[in-house]
Image: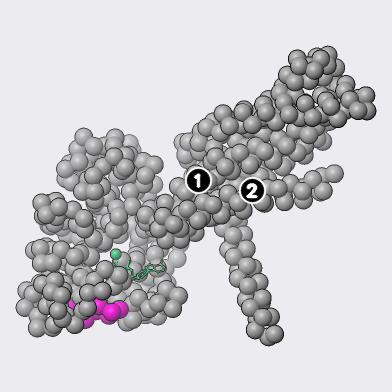
């Protein structure tokens, strides 16, 4: 389980998180919604320790990640898989080497075993035959899927997805959602998904949390969120121009 | 008055803090370079990029530099009736000064700028964050192979620069202006000592370190967006070039 306790973060004079508290239950998928620039990516980066909070704590299974150093930190990071917003595939490596990279760096597996595992993941994300293509030669959807394969290659217990479907066509969106759901059914990871694809993303969610103006304003099951009376949540889900959030 | 002093003080502190961060980055990189694993494949790839692919520009600049040295040297030396010393004049200028400096400047322009851009793009597209998240030290991953590759390639490129430059001077001095071929090389053999060569090699090692340090740091700390990367690239090339020239003066005064 991941717990954020009163996390504050400012960049220079610009406050981004102003007291985020959230519990991410083990083995379930939690969706984070919120406007662009609300600080969702910054929040995810806190969870893996890429960004340190100015105030507040992040606990993974009860351990404050700020206390971890060296090997313990390494060990924790290996329990995570991260799909970054832009994919973050290494430009200098082809798809196969990108997906194989964590295995080669962090395990003692032989090349044969690595090959089998990488090809299996690539098959799962429907990228077989693309092994020798470089990221620059792939479409946006393929890049996301390759990045997804890399995020899942180490069989992580916790997977963070930063906007896995942004910029994809509706069919690909459904495809990626189904992929996340299948992988989840198979591996049972704890998932945190940042997404704008409301309400479609609710089909894979166990819980939904709304981040607005630096705090979590509402948490609940997808049904509860969809039935929420909170004007903020209602406006976000329906995409209405009128409401407490001003489009600017 | 006080505010002016305060401002100056703040500026000074900012500069010191930045210098401190750069220094720390260099020391961390050097320390991590010495730790295994060494990844020979990555080192070779960087040697290809830094060294092999800089050959053309090194050969071109070296030939013209040698030729112009031959030309200028000949007419200057003739005033004193010392044309016979053209060989040593060309060779010493190259080995002690122009070889290390110009080779380093060419590597900066060709490979250093590309390196800043590459690492900067990795920064803004979260590839560096991805390395962190995988539990891989990005400074080691990015800097160690480049440092090792540069420490091998830049001195070699400098040596190639010197040889080609000396032949460029030969071409002008002997083939065009009629000095005897024997004189050119015999005089070089007489006047160029090991200490000249050693100084040049020492310089090229220092410049190799400088290029990777500054260009790597600028890319690693590149700001947001395409603008951040382009600014980092410009700053890297300018700062590296200035430091090469200033460092050359400092090293020369130390070596002489
Ligand atoms: N490393 C950083 N340095 C400075 N500002 C940052 C940094 N990372 C994010 N920000 C700022 O924090 C705010 C939230 O960003 P982000 O978390 O990416 O939003 P989103 O919710 O769209 O993912 C933005 O205004 C962004 O400019
Ligand atoms: Mg984001």
The image position of residue A147, as x and y in percent, is 27, 50
Relative to B108, residue B71 above or below: above
Picture quadrant where residue A113 is located: top left
The image position of residue B71, as x and y in percent, is 77, 26
Q: Camera-side residue: A106 or B116?
A: B116
Q: Residue at x 66, y 77 (%)?
A: B9
Q: Please say whether residue A218 is one of the residues in the magenta stretch.
A: yes
Taking the image in four quarters, ligand 2 sits in the one at bottom left
Q: Disc number at residue B115?
A: 1
**What chain does badge 2 belong to?**
B
Picture quadrant where residue A80 is located: bottom left
The image position of residue B102, as x and y in percent, is 67, 38
Relative to B196, residue B133 above or below: below
**Range of residues picked out in magenta:** A212-221
Q: Which SS class for mark 1?
A: helix
Q: Please say whether residue A52 is one of the residues in the magenta stretch.
A: no
Q: Are marks 2 and 1 on the same chain?
A: yes
**Could you tell me how far apart the alpha carbons at marks 2 and 1 are, in whole angstroms?**
15 Å
Name the residue that disc number 2 marks: B241
Q: Residue at x 40, y 77 (%)?
A: A14
Compare marks 2 and 1 and give the one earlier in the sequence.
1
């Amino acid at each position: 389980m991941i717990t954020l306790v009163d996390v504050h973060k400012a960049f220079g004079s610009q406050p981004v998180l102003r007291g985020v508290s959230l519990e991410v239950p083990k083995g379930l998928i939690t969706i984070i919604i919120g406007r662009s620039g609300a600080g969702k990516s910054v929040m995810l980066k806190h969870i893996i320790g890429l960004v340190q909070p100015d105030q507040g704590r992040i606990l993974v299974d009860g351990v404050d990640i700020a206390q971890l150093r060296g090997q313990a930190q390494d060990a924790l990071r290996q329990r995570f898989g991260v799909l970054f917003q832009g994919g973050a595939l290494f430009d200098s490596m082809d798809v196969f080497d990108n997906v194989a990279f964590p295995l080669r760096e962090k395990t003692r597996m032989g090349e044969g075993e690595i090959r089998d595992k990488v090809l299996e993941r690539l098959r799962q994300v429907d990228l077989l035959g693309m092994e020798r293509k470089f990221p620059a030669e792939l479409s946006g959807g393929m890049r996301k899927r390759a990045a997804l394969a890399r995020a899942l290659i180490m069989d992580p217990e916790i997977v963070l997805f930063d906007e896995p479907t942004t910029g994809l066509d509706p069919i690909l969106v459904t495809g990626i959602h189904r992929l996340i759901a299948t992988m989840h059914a198979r591996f049972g990871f704890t998932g945190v998904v940042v997404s704008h694809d409301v309400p479609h993303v609710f089909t894979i969610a166990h819980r939904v949390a709304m981040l607005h103006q630096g705090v979590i304003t509402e948490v609940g099951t997808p049904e509860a969120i969809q039935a929420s009376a909170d004007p903020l949540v209602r406006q976000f889900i329906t995409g209405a121009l009128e409401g407490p959030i001003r489009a600017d | 008055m006080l505010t002016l002093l305060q401002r100056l003080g703040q500026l000074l502190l900012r500069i010191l803090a930045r210098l401190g961060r750069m220094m720390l980055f260099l020391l961390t990189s050097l320390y991590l370079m010495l730790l295994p694993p060494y990844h020979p494949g990555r080192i070779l790839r960087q040697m290809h990029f830094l060294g092999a692919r800089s050959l053309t520009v090194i050969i071109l600049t070296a030939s013209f530099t040698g030729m112009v040295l031959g030309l200028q040297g000949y007419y200057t030396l003739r005033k004193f009736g010392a044309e016979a010393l053209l060989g040593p004049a060309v060779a010493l200028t190259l080995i002690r000064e122009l070889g290390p400096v110009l080779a380093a400047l060419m590597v900066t322009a060709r490979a250093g700028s590309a390196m800043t851009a590459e690492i900067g793009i990795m920064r803004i597209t979260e590839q560096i964050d991805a390395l962190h998240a995988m539990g891989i030290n990005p400074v080691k991953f990015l800097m160690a192979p480049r440092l090792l590759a540069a420490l091998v390639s830049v001195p070699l490129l400098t040596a190639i620069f010197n040889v080609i430059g000396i032949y460029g001077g030969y071409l002008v001095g002997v083939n065009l202006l009629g000095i005897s071929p024997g004189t050119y090389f015999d005089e070089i053999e007489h006047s160029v000592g090991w200490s000249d060569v050693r100084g040049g090699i020492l310089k090229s090692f220092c410049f190799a370190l400088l290029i990777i340090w500054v260009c790597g740091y600028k890319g690693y700390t590149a700001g947001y967006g395409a603008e951040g990367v382009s600014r980092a690239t410009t700053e890297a090339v300018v700062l590296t070039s200035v430091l090469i020239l200033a460092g050359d003066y400092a090293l020369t005064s130390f070596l002489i």
